[in-house]
Image (spheres, rainbow, N blue to C red):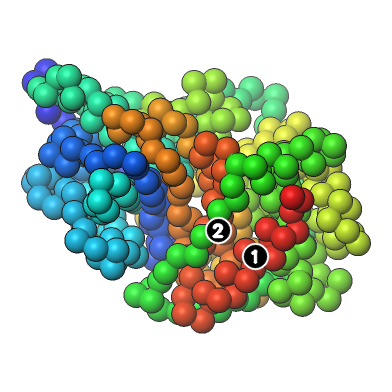
Amino acid sequence: MNDNVTIPDRFPIVILDLLMYVLDMSLFIMMIQMEVEFEHELDLNRLRRAIRLAMDAEPILGCRLVTTPPKMHWRRLENLDDNILEVAEDDEQFSAFRHRRISALEGPQLAAAVLREGGHDRLLIKVSHVVTDAGGTKEVVGLIANIYNKLDSDPDYRPVPNCTGSRDISQVTKRIPWRAYPRILLNLIGAFIPNSLPSRIFSLDIGDGPPEDLHYVSSRLPKERVECIARRGKRYGASLNDMLLAALYRTATKFGNWDGQKKLCIGTTVDLRRWHMPEGQGEAITHLSSFELPNLVCNLGRSFDDTLNNVVRITGRRKRSWFGLNVIIPVQLLAAAPQNLMFRILKNMSSKMTTGEVSMPGFTNMGMIDTATVNFGKPPCRAWMLTPPSRLPSLAAGVTGYDGSLTLSAGAYPSSRTIIEKFFEEMIAQLPG
């Protein structure tokens, strides 16, 4: 720890911490992981030290969540030097670490493992989704890499703890002019009313299982294929994300035996850092993500190009009107309520989602991984992120990119693993190239 800064022993929770904790209790296994493959060996002692210092640089990572009355908060752990880095002896042990949950209640909010494979190391870093999102996870990995590289030339390097950076969503909302709020409210009403009747929303049931049986399914699109997909998308003014969404819609209707009558909606995430923060990152490690509900109604179209045109029309309209901010108003209202009331409201909402009829697919674009983020002495040959697994029988898939390639991922149970593998095969087959 830097001698000039004393790290407090407790930190307040923010509204999105509370929401993610509720989701961790009910709907998702709230951890985000980044897996990195190197063509060189890492300095394990230096890596261990870098991970430990990262928990000082961003003190929230070295905390556990305290839920006992009178008020929930983050409590700094007394001993952070134990079990910082697991060195796996074989792929089985490495895989077991990948599937192991990270507990917000026990802490810390960060864990890592390395597998040595004859001069080629594989690094896996997992971060609690209760404390941050995918964008924040990339910031955590980048922080560890930066400290790792600085320790090479300065073994006594110690980062200054970030004890004052805001973790609150207000760092986004303060950039929104008041004149925008009526429009945002109308956008909110327009997004949620069409999706509020469960029997009218298309559901995709792929099976579920106990958390201890969790595994991951992933499929990689190489750089050449991604370039081909991007070229095709340009003809329609479509982003890569639009292309993937179109493929997901068409694949979901095939696997879910869509009757042509129920509305087609997919829950997607939005990184507010990218859209509403010029710096591209927050003041501290926190949640700065939101979601959108692009609804095709029943307009799938006969061909992939038809579907893509519909997706581009919907996402284009949203991107022109305070993209990702639909939930800002309800979040602000909740944040103003007493903590106990916030918790009860969120638990009630989560319970309705668990027992309700809506089981729409989810898709999270976790973005590109910059080479500098994962440069541990040298850049890796591969890097990707793993999507937080859903406890519901619906598909919760994600995508991340590195060095031009894309990797699809999803949590899977024994009953759903084969289905998800075939789903990804079909989804990729829908794409050009």
Q: Which label is found at residue 404?
A: none
Q: Residue 8: which quarter of the image? A: top left
Q: Is residue 167 left or right of residue 250?
A: left
Total marks placed: 2
Percent coordinates x, y for residue 192 in the rendering: 71, 54
Q: Amino acid at mark 2?
A: Ser
Q: Check disc 2 and report the residue beneath it.
A: 219
The residue at 24%/63% (across/down) is 90
Q: Is residue 118 left or right of residue 390?
A: left
The residue at 60%/42% (across/down) is 223
356 and 416: which is toward the camera: 416
Residue 227 appears in view? yes
Q: Quadrant of the N terminus?
A: top left
Q: Amino acid at mark 1?
A: Glu
Q: Which label is found at residue 425?
A: 1
SS category of the residue bearing label 2: strand
Contact between marks 2 and 1 (CB within 8 A): the answer is yes
Q: Which badge, 2 or 1, comes first in the chain's sequence?
A: 2
